[in-house]
Amino acid sequence: MKILVLNCGSSTLKFQLLEVDHKTSGQDKFKRLSHGVIDRIGDNKGTVDLYIENGSYMRDAIKSADHGQATRIVLEWLDSTDLLKTEGLGAIGHRLVHGGQQFVNPTLIDDKVIRDIEAISSLAPLHNIPALNAIRSAQEVLNRNVPMVAVFDTAFHHNLPEYASRYAISKELSDKHHIRRYGFHGIAHRYMTERYSAITSMPLEIIKIITLQLGNGCSASAVKGCGSVDTSMGFTPLEGLIMGTRCGDIDPSIAGFLARCEGNDIGEIENWLNTKSGLLGVSARSSDMRELLKAEHQGDKRATLAVEMFCYRVRKYIGAYLAALAGADAIIFGGGIGENSPDIRTRICSGMDWCGITLDSVRNTNAVGTEGIISTDDSKIKIYVMPVDEAIIIAQDTIRCLERYPI
């Protein structure tokens, strides 16, 4: 069976074509046949990168008006290769950022599900609407002959205890408007959790770990057993850690204060907090951690401050989650920054030997984009780097969903 995984960002479409080997189990049962990304969707300067695992590679400039057109490009390219000729496409798994309170399990997509996802898209308009465009486009291209499954980023956090998921506002308002801490990056946090269980042979039921997804968007999760018991993102992905362009935790009255002082409506202020803040806002230079580290080495003090604030916020959350979990077995670094920046990992872990966190400098330096342990042998809390592959989780859930609801 071959599964196509589509992962829609606000201006990107990533895909992987996976072949399932039912003779094996866990994450090893998936063989990647192809992958790629269409970037800068809706921009005249868009690009497409397409890879076949035998070494074939294509990069080209491309114009795609929306994620629906980008999906057509992917499906037409796959059809032009030999990858689907013998067996065809068995299913498509879609990543959906927000499932609200309704969608807490992988869900077989039909017209009603599409309408229900559309009804909650105001909670994540930059991501759910592009994903819906991709779903509709795939239905049209494939004449609805291929089953499709929606896998929700919020599902991993659905069972947060009420004291962690509730905001301290009126219960009537919370219930009326479905306001709670939903959490995001759940597929990534779940991947790190299941992968940690696999490489340590520790049963999921007894795991206590802190997972860090650090990229342009950043989040932390306290994981106990099979799920999240606390997470840094909340009602929207704006809360929590400092990110590339998002401010993270902030006094909520600042939004109203700025609206009054600057003469802008609240929607514009929210846009500033989401797109002009974070590393970019503090540094006034870039949202890219790599560029900020270079600038710091050149003496840019604002870049230095942005990096220091970023690392401090992550370290503070680690401390909070150690308290929430009453200790942890391990800390897992994932995401583009977490997987590829030994310098940032060093700064985050600096000064935490008091709680049993001791980084091995050689292991840390050598772990760039590769999986491995980076703590010392005698560190009470183990530290791992773990490149995240969300497509594997989406493919796993797609299979499970189809087994539960066969077509």
Image (tube, helix red, strand yellow):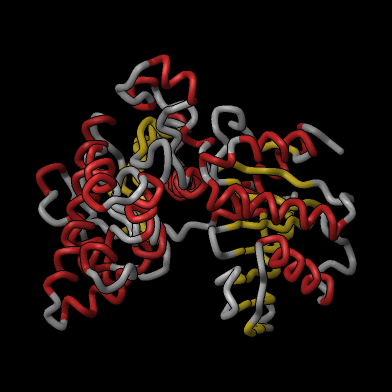
**Residue 254 horizontal/vertical position (percent):** 23, 43
Foreground residue among 407 and 67: 67
Instruction: Please say if 216 is above or below 206.
Output: below
Instruction: Please say if 122 is above or below 367.
Output: above
**Residue 344 in which image quadrant:** bottom left
State the residue lying farthest toward the front: 263
* Lateral position of residue 392 relative to residue 302, left or right: right
* Lateral position of residue 386 relative to residue 391, left or right: left
Q: Residue at x 53, y 52 (%)?
A: 126
In what quadrant of the picture does the C terminus appear?
A: top right
Q: Residue at x 60, y 46 (%)?
A: 96
**Residue 286 horizontal/vertical position (percent):** 30, 72
Q: Does any portion of residue 213 appear in the rendered image? A: no
**Residue 216 horizontal/vertical position (percent):** 39, 61
Foreground residue among 266 and 197: 266
* Lateral position of residue 337 relative to residue 159, left or right: left
Q: Residue at x 19, y 71 (%)?
A: 303
**Residue 44 in which image quadrant:** bottom right
In what quadrant of the picture does the N terminus appear?
A: bottom right
**Residue 37 in which image quadrant:** bottom right
Foreground residue among 67 and 197: 67
* Lateral position of residue 329 relative to residue 25, left or right: left
Q: Does any portion of residue 105 appear in the rendered image? A: yes
Instruction: Please say if 155 is above or below 255.
Output: above
**Residue 158 horizontal/vertical position (percent):** 49, 30
Number of marks drawn: 0
